Amino acid sequence: MSGKSVSPSGAAFDHVAPAYDAEATYLEISRWIRALVWERLAELFSAGDHVLEIGCGTGEDAIWLARRGVSLTASDASAAMLDEARRKAEQAGVSDLIAFRQLDLATVETWNLPAATFDGAISNYGPLNCIGDWTALGRTLAGAVRPGGRLGLAVMGPFCAWETVWHALHGDLRTATRRWRGRTTASIGGVSFPVYYPTPARLARELGPAFQRRRLSGLGVWLPPSDLYAALGKRSRLARGLLRLERLTAARWPFPYLGDHYWLEMQRVR
Ligand SMILES: C[S@@+](CC[C@H](N)C(=O)[O-])C[C@H]1O[C@@H](n2cnc3c(N)ncnc32)[C@H](O)[C@@H]1O
């Protein structure tokens, strides 16, 4: 096992690593949403590229990219999540293409990445929500990603229509509006940590002028967020209809601002 996790969010995921895939990754709707991300990753990166992944979790995206010939530095704050990812990469026969590193966003200034070597960086399903200021990350990425390189980031935004409507209808106004303050406290595996919800504009601004926005779409606009999956998962015809709506509308205003996550692509321009 790698070293101990530094920040509370990393330590929290240490507790859930062995069950994470069964409880999150392998849910049907979860797979559909990841497939939408993979469509974008296929546009962004091709065989021979070298990509930095931030908050790789159990390695689903790193393994998918490695199978397509992309090499990765896949990082996470949680030692236990990295252990899962390493095990799965070995099983998938792609471990020679993935270098795993324990990197914590809380100490991004100390990552010491080689200059301008990456063709891009990705972060899927909310690792960037574990910090409340993205300027230091922007500086690190501006140093490590080559000019022209791309970022693909899936981040929880401050307004999720599903969450608001669902919890309001169930009389839980506190949960319905929890993101609106821009910060909540999450508890995973008995460990509490702050979660931040930047708007796409704030995230792009704090990542700095080296990166320019290229694409913004919603993720989980019509398909519900993970804590509501169970309620919908049994109604598969409805879920498939929602997937069709998701595909049709997610990149059109105002839908990028209404999903559980948004997908922000940026390019290094200077
Ligand atoms: C919801 S999971 C997403 C994992 C993976 N990207 C995926 O798509 O399944 C969030 C991940 O962020 C990691 N994480 C939490 N806090 C972090 C931090 N401060 N620095 C880096 N990674 C962190 C967690 O360990 C966890 O693996």
Image (tube, rainbow, N blue to C red):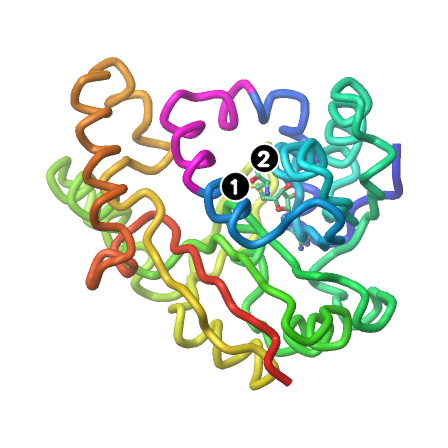
Q: Are marks 2 and 1 in contact (CB under 8 Å)?
A: yes
Q: Which mark is residue 190?
A: 2
Please tell me which residue is depicted at 40% across the width and 36% down the height of the picture. 33
**Residue that mark 1 sits on:** 187
Asked if the residue at label 1 sits under 8 Å from ligand 1, the reply is no
- Image-based side of 151 in relation to 10, left or right: left
- Image quadrant of residue 209? bottom right
Q: Secondary structure at mark 2?
A: loop
In the image, the segment drawn in magenta is 22-36
- Image-based side of 68 in relation to 261, left or right: right
Whether 52 is drawn above or below 4: the answer is below
Please tell me which residue is depicted at 16% across the width and 23% down the height of the picture. 238
Q: Does 31 lie within the magenta span?
A: yes
- Image-based side of 126 in relation to 88, left or right: left
Q: Secondary structure at mark 1?
A: strand
Between 174 and 44, the residue placed more toward the observer is 44
